[in-house]
C-alpha cells in the first residue's frame, strides 16, 4: 500500500471518527445533566411546618422520619394554625402538619405539586401509624390546599412547558443580535424591545389563556422581560468578547445546565447536593421562582429573585459594553 493511499484513508477516517466521538460525548453529557438530577431526586431538608396541642410532637416527628429517611425533612414548630398558614404564605415552609382537635395537612400546590403530593402521602402514612398507636381508632388527615393551581391547569403543566420558551427566547435574541447587530445601542434596544414583546405574549398565554399563572399580568410581564433581556445581553456580550467560545459557554450555562436545574418540575430541596440552589442563581431558576411567588404567594419575599435577575442584566450589559472595545480581527 502506497504512502499516498494511507494518507488518503487517514484523511477520510480521522474527521469521521472525531465527529462521532464528539457527538457521543456531547449527547451523553447533556443527557447526564438533564436526567441525573431527576433520576436521583430525593428530599433534602424540605421545610415542613408543625402545629399541635400535643407537647414535643415536632421533635417526635423529626426523630421518627429521620429513622426512615435521614435528613429528608426539616420540621419547624409553629404556635398555632394561623402562624403555620402565615409561614406557608411567606414561603418559609412548603406545607404543615396540624395535630390539634382536627388532624389536617396543609399543602401548597402552587409552590410545588411534587412536594404537595409528598406531603399528602406523608399524612396518609402518619395517619396509619397514629391509628395503630391509638388502638385502631382511625385517624384521617383532612387536606387543605392554601395555594391551589388554577382550574384550567390543575396539574401545573403550563409553567413547566412554558419554562423552555422563557430561556430559548433570550438565547435566540442573543444569537441573532450577535450575528446581525454591530452597534451596542442596537443590542441594548433589541434586548429590551424583544423582552417586552415576548413577555406580553408569553404571559398572555400562561396567565390569560391557560391559567397556569394567576398573578398581576403586568408584573409577570416585567419578570419575563427582565429575564429575556438579561439572557440575550449576556449572550451577545459573551459572543462579542470571545466569539464562538463565549457564545457556546453562555448557552451551555443557561440552557444545558440552567434549564434542568431551574426547579421547574422539582423544588431545589429535591435535587442532589446543592444543584437546586445553584439553579436558583441562574436567570431561569430565579424567573420561574419569582413567577410562582407573584402568582401564588403574593405575601412572600421576592427580593432575592429580583436581585438575581437584575445582577444578570447588569452582567450582560457590562459584557455588551466591553465588547464594543474589542477590535475586530483583520481579514
Image (cartoon, helix red, strand yellow):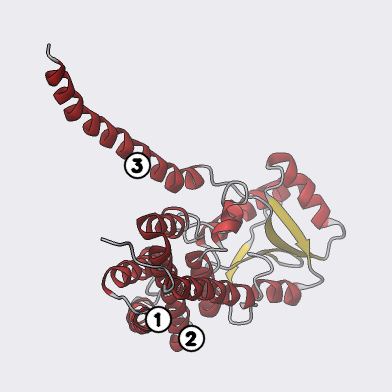
Q: Position of residue 104 (x, y in %)?
A: 66, 65
Residue visible at 37% across and 76% down in the picture = 206
User: Badge 2 is on which residue?
Assistant: 219
Q: Is residue 154 visible?
A: no
| Category of crowding for the residue at label 2, using alpha-carbon neighbours closer than 10 angstroms: few (below 14), some (14–19), many (at least 20) | some
Instruction: Answer left or right for 120 relative to 96.
Output: left
Quarter of the image with the N terminus in it: top left
| Residue 173 vs residue 275, the one in the foreground | 173
User: Badge 1 is on which residue?
Assistant: 188
Q: Earlier in the sequence, mark 1 or mark 3?
A: 3
- Find the distance from the CA under tag 1 to the CA under tag 3: 34 Å
| Residue 153 vs residue 326, the one in the foreground | 326
| Category of crowding for the residue at label 3, using alpha-carbon neighbours closer than 10 angstroms: few (below 14), some (14–19), many (at least 20) | few
| Category of crowding for the residue at label 1, using alpha-carbon neighbours closer than 10 angstroms: few (below 14), some (14–19), many (at least 20) | some
User: Badge 3 is on which residue?
Assistant: 27
Instruction: Answer left or right for 176 relative to 129.
Output: left
Please identify the residue farthest to the top as the structure is shown.
Answer: 1
Q: Nearer the viewer, mark 1 or mark 2?
A: 1
Q: Position of residue 229 (x, y in %)?
A: 42, 76
| Residue 309 vs residue 39, the one in the foreground | 309
- Find the distance from the CA under tag 1 to the CA under tag 2: 21 Å
Amino acid at each position: 500500500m502506497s504512502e499516498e493511499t494511507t494518507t488518503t484513508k487517514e484523511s477520510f477516517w480521522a474527521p469521521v471518527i472525531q465527529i462521532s466521538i464528539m457527538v457521543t460525548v456531547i449527547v451523553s453529557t447533556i443527557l447526564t445533566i438533564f436526567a441525573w438530577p431527576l433520576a436521583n431526586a430525593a428530599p433534602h431538608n424540605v421545610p415542613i411546618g408543625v402545629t399541635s396541642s400535643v407537647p414535643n410532637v415536632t421533635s417526635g416527628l423529626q426523630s421518627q422520619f429521620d429513622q426512615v429517611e435521614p435528613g429528608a425533612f426539616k420540621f419547624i414548630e409553629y404556635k398555632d394554625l394561623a402562624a403555620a398558614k402565615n409561614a406557608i404564605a411567606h414561603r418559609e415552609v412548603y406545607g404543615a402538619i396540624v395535630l390539634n382537635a382536627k388532624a389536617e395537612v396543609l399543602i401548597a400546590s402552587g409552590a410545588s405539586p411534587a412536594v404537595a403530593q409528598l406531603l399528602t402521602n406523608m399524612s396518609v402514612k402518619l395517619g396509619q401509624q397514629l391509628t395503630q398507636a391509638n388502638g385502631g381508632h382511625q385517624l384521617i388527615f383532612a387536606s387543605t390546599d392554601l395555594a391551589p393551581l388554577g382550574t384550567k391547569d390543575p396539574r401545573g403543566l403550563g409553567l413547566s412547558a412554558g419554562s423552555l420558551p422563557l430561556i430559548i427566547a433570550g438565547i435566540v435574541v442573543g444569537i441573532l443580535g450577535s450575528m446581525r447587530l454591530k452597534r451596542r445601542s442596537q443590542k441594548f434596544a433589541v434586548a429590551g424591545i424583544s423582552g417586552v414583546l415576548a413577555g406580553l405574549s408569553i404571559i398572555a398565554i400562561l396567565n390569560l389563556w391557560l391559567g397556569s399563572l394567576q398573578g398581576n399580568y403586568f408584573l409577570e410581564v416585567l419578570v419575563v422581560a427582565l429575564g429575556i433581556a438579561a439572557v440575550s445581553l449576556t449572550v451577545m456580550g459573551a459572543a462579542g468578547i470571545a466569539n464562538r467560545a463565549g457564545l457556546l459557554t453562555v448557552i451551555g450555562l443557561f440552557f444545558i445546565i440552567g434549564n434542568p436545574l431551574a426547579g421547574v418540575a422539582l423544588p431545589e430541596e429535591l435535587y442532589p447536593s446543592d444543584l437546586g440552589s445553584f439553579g436558583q442563581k441562574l436567570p431561569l431558576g430565579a424567573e420561574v421562582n419569582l413567577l410562582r411567588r407573584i402568582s401564588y404567594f403574593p405575601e412572600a419575599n421576592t427580593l432575592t429573585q429580583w436581585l438575581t435577575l437584575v445582577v444578570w442584566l447588569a452582567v450582560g450589559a457590562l459584557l455588551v459594553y466591553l465588547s464594543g472595545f474589542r477590535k475586530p480581527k483583520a481579514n
